[in-house]
Amino acid sequence: MLKMAADGGGKEMNEIKSQFSTREGAYKLLTHSEYSRPNRVPFNSQGSNPVRVTFVNVNDQSGNGDRICFNVGRELYFYIYKGVRKAADLSKPIDKRIYKGTQPTCHDFNHLTATAESVSLLVGFSAGQVQLIDPIKKETSKLFNEERLIDKSRVTCVKWVPGSESLFLVAHSSGNMYLYNVEHTCGTTAPHYQLLKQGNNYAVHTCKSKSTRNPLLKWMVGEGALNEFAFSPDGKFLACVSQDGFLRVFNFDAVELHGTMKSYFGGLLCVCWSPDGKYIVAGGEDDLVTVWSFLDCRVIARGHGHKSWVSVVAFDHYTTSVEESDPMEFSGSDEDFQDQIHFGRDRANSTQSRLSKRNSTDSRPVSVTYRFGSVGQDTQLCLWDLTEDILFPHLPLSRTRTHTNVMNATSPPATGSGAAVITNTNNPSTNGSNNSGASTPGSLPVALPRSNSLPHSASGSGNSKSAVSDNPIATGVSKFATLSLHDRKDRHPEKDHKRNHSMGHISSKSSDKLNLLTKTKTDPAKTLGTQLCPHMEDVPLLEPLICKKIAHERLTVLIFLEDCIVTACQEGFICTWARPGKVGLLSSLNQANSPSGTVV
């Protein structure tokens, strides 16, 4: 069990919180909306895989179409999720499965095909297999990598390819990823591969066989485990984080490397995209959250608030704030104000469309604040705001009039390859190309503000669906010569990590043995201080809006929903936190029946 040492805070630091407040109001834990194993007994998590949670909406006519799936140890549960509306009924799971000889490690629903009568759920396992099940029909339709001929290592991440009813991607602790089609078999012999494309510390192979079989593609990425991947909102790009400490972003269809980033220390464990696909946040064994610009391919900020490894990062699409303003207009109605603070899907879609306008040539300036969160092995939840002063800290002087929240810090400009890129605010990028190293004359000095909350109104943004071809490898195979690849040895940089280090003692030695992933040949020992991994003083350091201890055991889940936030810890308790104004009928129940002293 993880033991936390209070930093001089005594009992107050160790007290588990049941509510917290931000600029938009108070978030409250709904104890009667807690999901767990039916007996509610804390799970002995020693040696088990992380608890994971996935949601799907089956659009049933009752208006209660949300379904939740979670794994605890060898068990997998599927419930109706009642959220902030009604108390959870743990005595009636729709489906429950107990596995022998292996444990579920991750899972994902296909949102395109989900109905009230049928859902397609992929489940990855610790022994390497992937199962396709329908927990509504209580059917098991297919088992992939059944004989472990494709990969024998633990499945770390499994996701349906956005926009596809049949393609899915699976990552393993071997460092490999595989693209499958549910319609194809895996074969009775080990697959043979032909090189499709090779680059800096990655290679992609096609499966060489007379008839089409799984896997369609094999990706070999970095060194050590591939811990998580995430598709961009439009489904065109894939962000991967690995135990070697690298974030790698690929063009998924073209199987080409778009850009890379190196952690400050140790492996990267989690990754997510902003709602508009412009920014990626990664977390890991350096106890930091790192914000990376997709357009500029560079680190733009780091956040320090956790005291141990960061296990999950996620953007809050519903609290991302977008403000449009006319320079000549300074009035607004009460109705406009109410619209700004409304949480909901309509607002989320509106924000999504307006986020996309940031690159347009419209003369009306658009200001945006991104909200994201993180949870870690320190049992703490952190919320962060990514604001204009961080995104564009050194605007040309002629443009600062439209962005009044730019901080004119007097820090000296950064030098060397770690220097920041100057971006035109009204049109940051017109072609999405990698413009790393570009600069604009007449810029302000590089500012290093410590930012947390700026007074933006809370609103929302939504996920955009994408259309991806079910045959991403139809062309281009013959263009690449077959090359032999050296055998790769798994690395374990986590052995060198000191869990309770202070920021001042992080050294560059953690990168000495890592392969550098730049397009130019550079000494691998010199990643620290380059654009791959800037020094701490060369990028803004974010402070969390809130940083609260919310569990007894390490946290493994953070999901932002329309009316609540969902977290889970390794003891197997899935908690619902009502957003401000969304407590509903459960508030009185919680107050009347909440146990005193501790909150699970």
Image (cartoon, rainbow, N blue to C red):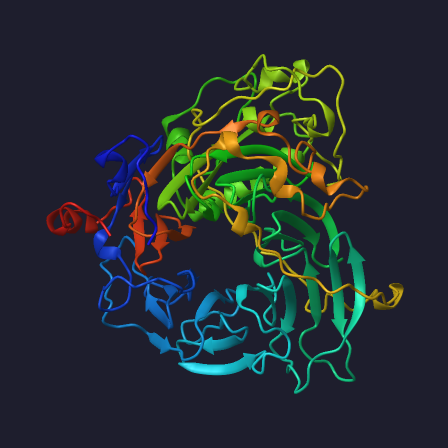
Residue placed at 36% from the left, 30% from the top?
23
On the image, which quarter does residue 151 sit in? bottom right
Residue in the foreground of this view, choosing between 291 and 430 = 291
What percent of the width, then of the height, locates residue 71? Answer: 39, 66
On the image, which quarter does residue 38 sit in? bottom left
Residue in the foreground of this view, choosing between 556 and 87 = 556
Residue placed at 12% from the left, 52% from the top?
593
Residue in the foreground of this view, choosing between 553 and 237 = 553
Q: Is residue 368 visible?
A: yes
What percent of the width, then of the height, locates residue 142? Answer: 53, 82
What percent of the width, then of the height, locates residue 131? Answer: 51, 76
Q: Is residue 585 visible?
A: no
Lateral position of residue 443 relative to residue 119, left or right: right
Residue extending furthest bottom?
188
Q: Above or below — where is 79 with respect to 400?
A: below
Q: Above or below — where is 3 with respect to 82?
A: above
What percent of the width, then of the height, locates residue 268? Answer: 56, 48
Residue extending furthest left?
592
Residue placed at 56% from the left, 32% from the top?
301
Location of the N terminus (image quadrant): bottom left
Lateral position of residue 2 relative to residue 314, left or right: left
Q: Above or below — where is 413 with respect to 175?
A: above
On the image, which quarter does residue 374 sit in? top left
Q: How many marks?
A: 0
